[in-house]
Image: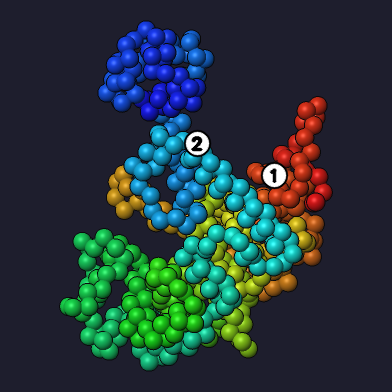
Amino acid sequence: MGVRLRRLREERNLTQTAVARALGISNSYLSQIEQNQRPLTVPLLLKLNAAFGVDVQFFSEDEEGRLISDVREALTEGGAEQVSTAELRELALNMPVVGRALVALHRKSRQSADRAEAMALKLGEDFSGDAPARMPFEQVRDFFYARRNHIAELDDAAERLYEAAGLKPRLVRPGLEAWLAQRHGVRVIVDEAETVQRRFDPVNRTLHVSPFTKQGQQAFQMAMQLAFLEAGETIDGLILGADARDRETRDLLRIGLAQYFAGAVLLPYAIFLKQAEAFAYDIVRLGRHFGVGFETVCHRLSTLQRPGAQGVPFFFVRVDRAGNISKRQSATDFHFSRVGGSCPLWNVYEAFTQPGRVLTQMAQMPDGRTYLWIARTVGAPEPAYGAPGKTFAIGLGCDIRHASRLVYSQGLNLGDLAAATPIGAGCKVCERPACPQRAFPPIGRALLIDPDRSAATPYPSAALR
């Protein structure tokens, strides 16, 4: 509080003597308060308010906390090196005007980037411009997007491994365990003391997997380890071609490629595509046939873009209850907005209200493109009493012209596009003028503000400028 009192005095060009006299204390007492050696008591705060008209909220720690949070966000999104909480607090205490200026600049920059991306999306172009540098996970996501979520080199390598190891559906786990032992001298240990799903000890040649995961998940972790042991050179070549310049991006990309390889081993391309067509892309049946989970099947379905042997081009997304998108892959040109979240009318959020049930939705974007979406929750229960579990909703979608190939189109009138739910990429870039669920005003449009009229639609706006 002393720092703020001193700043207040300096901003008003007051001497210590003048403030001390107004508060009825000595100069030395005031000096001790400004040096944080004595507390600024409530009676003194009231005297400050009476003498100088100072709002006591000026001395609130909540205001300092808000500024610290805002500055941390600005510096983090701006790509600055990590700043400690102590340094942020020092800035908020001693130079709050500078802190607020940083926050204002950051918000202005973010608004400009949002507007530029919104305009680029409307023109059907990729956004780069002068936006802040992409985070490592964004660079990895864009790598897969640029390849239409299909890595042919890893699919080919996975099929060769599947055949060489003599793997069969629902028997992949024991087959991979035997292959690791025979080919690489690696012993698989199911360790109840293990706190992670997979841990490889290269010295003792042991692979520790958690017993608290399903057989398909254990097989996935084994296949992921085989990605590093057998497809390492292929993965290194892909990383080199990606021009990933920082170590964190390269490491994340290496893990992403290893996960792609693991999924391709459990669900080899040709065999999986044939079965998917035979089952009319029934996700539950495919999971039961191959012994893997719902999410694994959905993720694999979004990768079937081999030239000459293409499956339905799907979009894959995983979200949590708060609307955060933790995974998103697109085999075609569907755009997941980075601006302002996703659409609340999308059935992927409705899935949380009906856990475990597969929901279908015909959804139409503002440009008239219509899609069939499948959504269902996945997750894991709490590992122990009092420990949090995890729940996500998986969304899998395709263009309506492919919907007839899916079992999920049964009972739907695919020709009645008027029955489709109107959704958008995200409120800030959505062009729909009359959406009752709008959370943000659209970028690039002037708001129609009328104090004499209350509209049912939030943020009524004018035509695009």
> The disc labelled 1 sits on which kind of residue?
Pro
Q: Which mark is residue 441?
A: 1
Q: Secondary structure at mark 1?
A: loop
Instruction: Give the residue furthest to the top.
Output: 24
**Residue 7, image x, y percentages:** 43, 27
Q: Which mark is residue 17?
A: none
Which residue, given by chain and number where applicable, does mark 2 sit on? 97
| Along the viewing direction, whichever of 146 and 77 lies nearer the viewer | 77
**Residue 376, image x, y percentages:** 54, 58
Sequence-wise, the earlier of marks 1 and 2 is 2
The image quadrant that residue 254 belongs to is bottom left
Q: Residues within 10 Å of mark 2 (few under 14, many from 20)?
A: few
Q: Residue at x 44, y 46 (%)?
A: 72
> The disc labelled 2 sits on which kind of residue?
Val
Q: Residue at x 27, y 65 (%)?
A: 211
Foreground disc of the pair 1, 2: 2
Q: Residue at x 32, y 47 (%)?
A: 387
Q: How many marks?
A: 2
**Residue 69, image x, y percentages:** 45, 41
